[in-house]
Image (cartoon, helix red, strand yellow):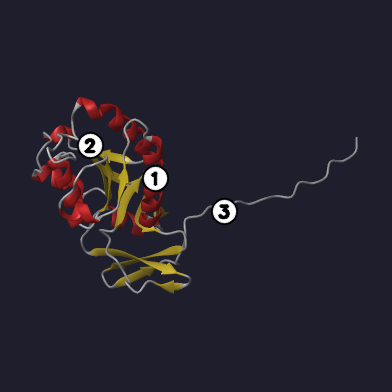
Amino acid sequence: MKIFLAFAFRDEDKECVSNLKQLLTSHDIEILTGENLGGETLTPAVKEEIEKSDALVAVLTQRQSLSAGGWTTHQWVVDELNHAYGKGKMAIALLESDISLQGMAQSHHHIHLDKSNQIKSFLELSQTIGRWKSKLGSTLKFQILPPSLAARLASGDSTIECKYRLWIKGVPDKADWKSANEARIAPEDFATFAYVDGVQDNQLVQLRVVDNGNEWLSPAKSQWTQIELSQKLPEQPK
């Protein structure tokens, strides 16, 4: 899973952001940021990073106090959060007290952030990430056989077409066959594999390959391993 981490590049937030990165890493998350893209503005490069992520976490901390009370926050971080919402991404903000939000971020759920006591905020974020990962599903890996067909797929020949579909409780998904662009084909160690993303625990995957009018069809399968047990004979008395 890839998460874009939106935050202000300033000393006051370094400890909080460092702890947050450790939390994301513990979930086996690939972290994307705008650290190497200049920061502070929603550039096309930042938009691209957000759009190729699965979700976004924004750290909205107090910036300047207002004469009427409350605080401003970092506008570029709000812009990144709103861009994620606009693209339909899963997103959440860690929000310090007394900050007023504008745009789509205002109407979405957020997590209260107390930088002096981050544990409660991070526990709630950890639960949110768990739900996100469950929603995204798993990536399953299948070896393609026979080897002659696998070699044709690995060659990248545009005349051969590979698709997949999901089965749920013994019934094919109504969305039917999806293109090979969504089932990645990769030659590895003298074999060819298909990677299918977003598979839930109750789903099976079926592959179909069409080459010059000929069609190959796999059974619907989950990713599992056969474990064969042998009976242990009783020890003979000495």
> Element at badge 3?
loop
Badge 3, how many Cα within 10 Å: few under 14, some, many 20+?
few
Q: Amino acid at mark 3?
A: Gln
Q: Is residue 202 visible?
A: yes
- The label on residue 226 is 3
Nearer-the-camera pick, 108 or 211: 108
> Element at badge 2?
loop
The location of residue 194, given as percent across then percent down, is: 35, 55
Q: Which residue is mark 1?
A: 124
In-image side of 71 versus 203 (left or right): left
Task: For marks 1 and 2, give the CA distance.
Answer: 17 Å
Q: Which residue is mark 2?
A: 61
Q: Which residue is situated farthest in the front direction here?
A: 68
The location of residue 210, given as percent across then percent down, is: 30, 68
The answer to which image quadrant residue 188 occupies is top left
Q: Amino acid at mark 1?
A: Glu
Q: Which residue is situated farthest in the right direction here?
A: 238
- In the displayed structure, 121 sits above or below 19; it is below
Q: Earlier in the sequence, mark 1 or mark 3?
A: 1
From the image, state whether disc 3 or disc 2 is nearer to you. Answer: 2
Q: Earlier in the sequence, mark 1 or mark 2?
A: 2
In-image side of 33 versus 235 (left or right): left
The location of residue 108, given as percent across then percent down, is: 26, 55
Q: Earlier in the sequence, mark 3 or mark 2?
A: 2
Tag 3 near tag 2, CB within 8 Å: no
